[in-house]
Amino acid sequence: MTQNKEIHAHWIHKKIEDPTAVSGFFYARECTCSNCGKEVNMEKPHCPFCGAVMDEANKDD
């Protein structure tokens, strides 16, 4: 009997420097899965490539 283990991950957004932003940067809309490293054009509840559930706390903050 095989066990289907659910993967938990988070989206990683690239910072874009911008002197007009109050903080000095913006986050890109595109993001990368912390599990498989594939890029998508916007956040989704699950990674379309590896199926990871995007409910893990973002460790990059």
Image (cartoon, helix red, strand yellow):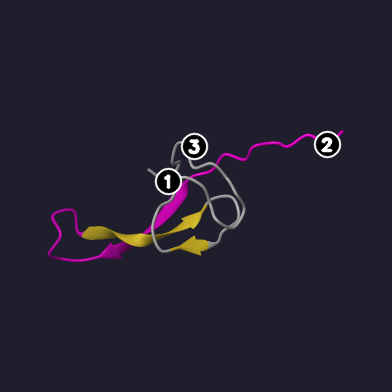
Question: What residue lies at 54% left-to-right and 41% top-to-bottom?
Answer: 53
Query: Quick one: SS at disc 1?
Result: loop
Q: Are marks 1 and 2 in contact (CB under 8 Å)?
A: no
Where is residue 20 shown, x and y percent of the image?
Answer: 12, 64
Q: Is residue 52 above or below residue 20?
A: above
Q: Residue furthest front?
A: 1
Q: CA distance from mark 1 to mark 3?
A: 11 Å
Could you classify mark 1 by the number of other residues whose Cα lies within 10 Å: few (under 14), some (14-19), or many (20 or more)? few
Question: What residue lies at 44% left-to-right and 53% top-to-bottom?
Answer: 12
Residue identifier under label 1: 60
Indicate the quadrant containing the N terminus: top left, top right, bottom left or bottom right: top right
Residue identifier under label 2: 2
Question: What residue lies at 41% left-to-right and 63% top-to-bottom?
Answer: 41
Q: CA distance from mark 1 to mark 2?
A: 33 Å
Q: Is residue 16 above or below residue 56?
A: below
**Residue 56, numbered label:** 3
Q: Which residues are magenta?
A: 1-24
Question: Which mark is first along the chain, 3 or 2?
Answer: 2
Mark 1, mark 2: which one is toward the viewer?
2
